[in-house]
Amino acid sequence: MYHMGTRLFFSLFVITGCLFFSIGQVTKVQASTLTYGSKSQNVRYVQLRLQNLGYFHTNVTGFYGSQTRQAVLQFQRDNHMRPDGRVGPATWTKLQHAGSRKQSEIDQLAHLIYGEARGESYWGQVAVGAVVMNRLKSPYFPHSIPGVIFQPGAFTAVADRQYNLTPNFKAYRAALAAFNGADPTRHSLYYFNPKLATSRWIWSRPRTVRIGKHVFAH
């Protein structure tokens, strides 16, 4: 019995060790930079991160082709990095950070942007996301992204369930840009469509800028 238990323990130890080694290979920065033509498990990991963030819209293959390069380039631009289309240590670190701890918040922001402003330009969509981010800094609003989004009566898209629609690539790009600090609204806390708004209160707010169909205000 002791002999069989020892063998079983050893086998489990080897399997577990191999598993952790495999995961470690995928999640730690390698010495070589990933670039066009690369093929590895690390490329699969990058593609998965980009896919989760709304940049990569095809199957995860492990081959660094033109679509992967374009996705990396756009991710780098949106994160104010040097756009070289390569995944070196800096880009790798940014991908890991964006794709783990904050992914659910970016998803929520993308859903709101798509529900509220999917007919607007890219910057019009960034502006809607920026309003959410600006409210986080105000003492008059909840201090979390879901808290702001789901505050009763705050957004029409939540009330009429357009929030539940599936965001497209542009909405995810806009969400990430707003999340990272882009703000074409000049620190606005509100926005409205002047053709539809009937509230005297919203019309009384100091206006900052108009982007597309929306007027932004403090």
Image (spheres, rainbow, N blue to C red):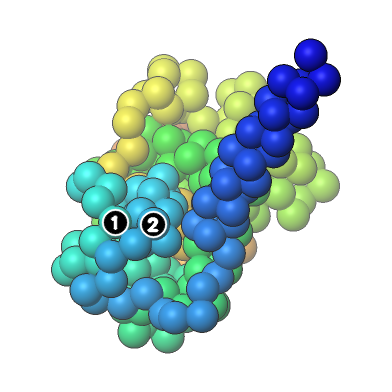
Residue topped by disc 2: 41
Residue at the top extreme? 1
Label 1 crowd (10 A; few <14 / some 14-19 / many >=20)? some
> Left or right: 205 with respect to 69?
right
Residue at point 28%, 42% (across, down): 168
State which quarter of the image contains the C terminus.
Answer: bottom right
Q: Residue at x 77, y 28 (%)?
A: 6
- In percent of the image, x 59 and y 38: which residue is there? 15
Residue 105 drawn at (x, y percent): 58, 42
Residue type for callout 1:
Gly
Q: Secondary structure at mark 1?
A: loop
- Which residue is nearer to you in this view: 173 or 91? 91
Residue 62 got which mark?
1
Quadrant in which the N terminus is drawn:
top right
Cβ–Cβ below 8 Å for labels 1 and 2? yes
Relative to 140, residue 70 above or below: below
Across and down, in percent, residue 165 comes to 34, 27
Please state if 162 lies on the left or on the right of 63 as rendered: right
User: Is residue 212 in sight in this rendering?
Assistant: no
Mark 1–mark 2 distance (CA, rounded to whole Å): 6 Å
Question: Which amino acid, by three-letter code, is at mark 2?
Answer: Gln
x, y percentage for residue 103?
54, 45
